[in-house]
Amino acid sequence: MSTGTVQAHVLIVEDLPDTQRWLADIVAQAFPGTTVQLAGSVAAARALLPTRQWALALIDLGLPDGSGIDLISQINETLPHLPAIVTTIYDDDDNLFSALAAGASGYLLKSQAAPALARQLQQQQQGYPPMSPSIARRLLTHFRQQAAFGETTLGDAASPPLQLTAREQDVLRCIGHGMRTQEAAAELGLTEHTVTTYIRNLYEKLNISSRAEAALEAARRGLLPT
């Protein structure tokens, strides 16, 4: 997320006032000059979504009137260019993979220190999904275990990965770098419709369902810098 000369708006969906203020301070550290809007429930967040052009949404999972995962699903369907990053205390597989499947762009644990969370949020600017270290390790362990049993959802790691065309690799690389659809289109000299079609086909071909998984697949294929 880059503020540039345009005022950027960040939505924080969190029901605890002290944690709201803590997250707002972290956003200010990570992205000076942004404005923050707070929502304490799924309903409040849904009411705010159409009111601004949001640059980023930080979403808690356990909210008074439902799950943040439902809100992430809505954002993924209606505002697919808005990065929705989970900020939660839950580090279990059910919440992690449900959030990623719903379209979360990152997964951060609130047990971390504020400076670490600010640095991880800034990874969004650099094209990498913000992930707490323990979450990144959990994901890698999960995919290694699936590969060992021949059940990996990111191709078949026990055999050569599915072959992609040069253009498909270009699009996957752009997704892995965190580019939005219009940014990838400009980078590759394609229309947004064409890039959207490539992304849809890649998701089906690789059996993935989120940009976070796409970034992991891009890294696995050596398309991202190490």
Image: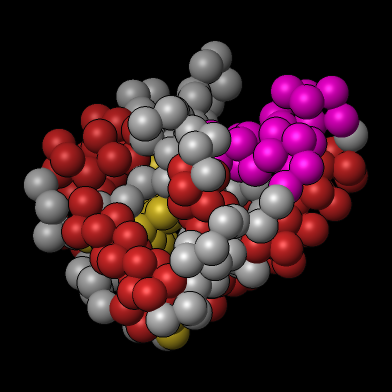
Q: Main secondary structure of the magenta part?
A: helix
Residue 80 point in image, percent of width and height: 67, 54
User: Which residue is pictured at 70% across the width and 34% down the height?
Assistant: 170
User: Which residue is pictured at 54% across the width and 63% down the height?
Assistant: 159
Residue 74 point in image, percent of width and height: 63, 69
Quarter location, residue 135? bottom left
Residue 166 belongs to the span the image colors magenta: yes
Identify the colour scheme used.
secondary structure
Q: Is residue 137 above or below residue 60?
A: above
Residue 148 point in image, percent of width and height: 38, 75
Q: Looking at the image, which is closer to me, 81 or 13?
A: 81
* Residue 160 visible in image: yes
Range covered by the magenta-colored residues: 164-190
User: Which residue is pictured at 85% across the width and 52% down the height?
Assistant: 197
User: Which residue is pictured at 29% across the width and 40% down the height?
Assistant: 120
Q: Is residue 43 above or below residue 200?
A: below
Residue 40 point in image, percent of width and height: 37, 68
Q: Is residue 196 left or right of 88 when viewed as pictured?
A: right
